[in-house]
Amino acid sequence: MTEVFLILSAYRDRLRQVHLSEVNTRSKHDPLSIASILAFRDVAELIPTDIPIILETPVREERIMEEISKAAEALPVRELATAS
């Protein structure tokens, strides 16, 4: 997350979207974990609140709202829209 902090600090005004995800050792997306939620919380204030957040976590349909709740925990300074 050091690189994320540096990039957001330098280019925050150029940001157009954020892909919120956790990537495993095989470079595949996983559902958000406690560790990833806490890591995103460290940089959440650097993400402008008008930037779209794209949630890239692979979950079954019945777990979508749970994953959106995790994203809201990761970015507590934002109001996240829920899927309809």
Image (cartoon, grey):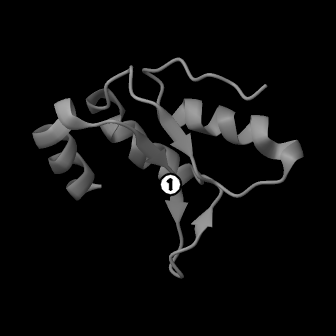
Give above or below for 33 relative to 38.
below
- Say whether residue 79 is left or right of residue 44: right
> Residue at the location (69% across, 25% down)?
82
- 8 and 42: which one is in front? 8
Residue reaching furthest to the right: 62
- 53 and 22: which one is in front? 53
Give above or below for 69 relative to 19.
above
Mark 1 surroundings within 10 Å by alpha-carbon count, few (fewer than 14), some (14 through 19), many (20 or more): few
Q: How far from the left and from the top, in percent, is residue 6?
A: 15, 49
Residue highlighted by disc 1: 35
Kindly state the secondary structure of the residue where label 1 is placed.
helix
Give above or below for 26 relative to 67.
below
Residue reaching furthest to the left: 10
> Residue at the location (59% across, 65% down)?
29
- Say whether residue 68 is left or right of residue 54: right
Q: How far from the left and from the top, in percent, is residue 61?
A: 85, 46
Amino acid, disc 1: Ala
Q: How many marks?
A: 1
Q: How far from the left and from the top, in percent, is residue 20?
A: 49, 47
Give above or below for 72 relative to 28.
above
Q: Quadrant of residue 42?
A: top left
Quadrant in which the C terminus is drawn? top right
Quadrant in which the N terminus is drawn? bottom left
- Say whether residue 62 is left or right of residue 27: right
> Residue at the location (26% across, 51% down)?
4
